[in-house]
Amino acid sequence: MALNIIKIIQKSFLLSLAISLTSISTSALSQTTLVHNVKGYTYLNNGQLAEFSAIVFEDGKVITTGANLQKNYPDALVIDGKGKTLLPGLIDGHGHYLGLGFNLLQVDVRDIASKQKTAFKVAQYAKANPELNWIKGRGWNQVLWPSKEFPTAKDLDEYVADKPVVLGRVDGHAVWLNSKAMSLAGITRNTISPDGGEIVKDKTGEPTGILIDNAENLLWENVPKQTDAERLAAFNKVNQHLLGLGITSVHDAGIDHNTYHFLQDQIKAENFKVRVYAMLAATDDKLEEMLKHGYISDDNELLSIRSVKIYGDGALGSRGAAMLSAYHDDPKNTGLLLTKPDRLRELYKIIFNYDFQINIHAIGDRANKIALDEFEFAFKNKASSKNLRNRIEHAQVIQLEDIPRFKALDILPSMQPTHATSDKNMAQDRIGAQRLKGAYAWQTFLKQGSKVIAGSDFPVELANPFFGLHAAVTRQDRKNLPEQGWIKEESLTIEQAFKAFTLDAAYGAHQDKTLGGLEQGKWADFILIDQDIFTIEAKDIWKTKVLETWVAGKKQHSL
């Protein structure tokens, strides 16, 4: 009997302790927090730019912003912002989330001035990582090299011949292989280029080691699939990287079936730090199976899936962008359509049948025209699909007469400012001066009333959003070139650029009611930075450092 009484007392004590701990946890979670002494900026849903010196939030959401708020919240946890600038968390409207994570774990060959130096860096990486069966990397750009010509397998073989090497071009639309990788992929002089792709061959008909767009699939079929352990390492890497840059939300431009489930598993494991608006890859064999599950969103809006990424054409740098007339520097080439028009029409019908948003990659003027034509056709059969905030990703080179069609069809241009400053040295060579009049036309879109969704297309470009803000405002690279800005009339004001990276980016993901700004009821996603981007000289915007990053009222990064 005495033993039973003791057990009852123990159970009662443990129950009381559990209740007490729960109360403490709930209290901590619901703690009202006030950050004051800041120079705050945010766009409101009415389109106005507001300034404030204090912000109050609780349970992860904003209660209010303003000035002299401490007297209204005497019990709040008070944090001194020390006069720093406070902005809503920045949104990258087009990136490749796990792609960047994997890129951060591989050899980076970006901005190297020659193919020999690139191959040498790969050799160093291979030597430092002897356990790897495949050497993977990304970032080469032949436009930066003296010859400006594609490299060859032999160029890599001189440095690494015993292991397969695959290096993605900076834009992700071509790969450079060594002979070992070509052999494992079964690519010979008799291998035929697939639709929407090209196996580059020399004058004798031998493959050179360059695969463009859909031809890359010949390789990936023979590369070991990524494991969940590798995905998790990439996931953790990219989370911390983006938080350090002030990015609190990413529109992930194309996920396959495995990643679709992997991301949901990470939500269940509470591993998310950055919000992800993921687009299903239209190339995945299980697309319709995923569509049948409908929209996916967790209570904290860390993961949202309600859109599909379609691949229209290739990229300008590799001359894979689909053009209405031949390339200026390659008269026999008009680029590549990665998805044929008849398949495109079929995809639009399938996707709109499930009321998913369509986000189609289109860089060349032909690809953009076809994408608009297919939207117009689809809306005639299902008018409600016009309200899904459909997007054209990149919207890079467009016939002048097609630009107004974006507004007429309610198509959002999702554009990446650093593409312009990266492409400025080769774009006119590729397409000539006349076609540049409808290229990288951010201000033209804004003037007609279109909302521009800004992003980086990382890891094609560096993910730092302040590089994007700088490029949008100056139309210059980070060396302040060209002096007057490249096609300066298409530049944005800092206010316009800021809106494109916050409120309008959130709009493009159907999230403008809860993200993209700091208003009552929105998530308390914000950053503290070391300089006021609205008052400094535009040339210095890219130098901005992120001191703190908060997501849903929790500090996730501190410098």
Image (spheres, rainbow, N blue to C red):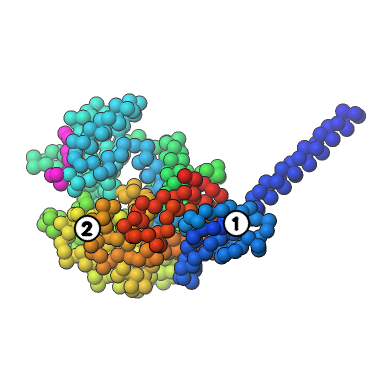
For this orientation, the residue located farthest to the left is 204
* Residue 229 in sight in this render: yes
User: Residue 456 at x, y = what percent?
Assistant: 35, 54
Name the foreground residue: 166 vs 237. Answer: 237
Judge whether residue 131 is colored magenta: no
Q: Which residues are magenta?
A: 146-155
Residue name at image x 20 percent, y 42 percent: 113
Looking at the rendered structure, which numbered label has been put on residue 445?
none
User: Residue 491 at x, y = what percent?
Assistant: 30, 65
Answer with left or right where residue 258 lies relative to residue 478: right
Residue name at image x 80 percent, y 37 percent: 13
Residue name at image x 49 percent, y 49 percent: 548
Residue name at image x 15 percent, y 57 percent: 429
* Residue 305 in sight in this render: no
Does residue 158 lie above or below 151 as drawn? above
The residue pinned by badge 1 equals: 34
Q: Earlier in the sequence, mark 2 or mark 1?
A: 1
For numbered disc 2, what is the local secondary structure?
loop
User: Residue 197 at x, y = what percent?
Assistant: 23, 49
The residue pinned by badge 2 equals: 482
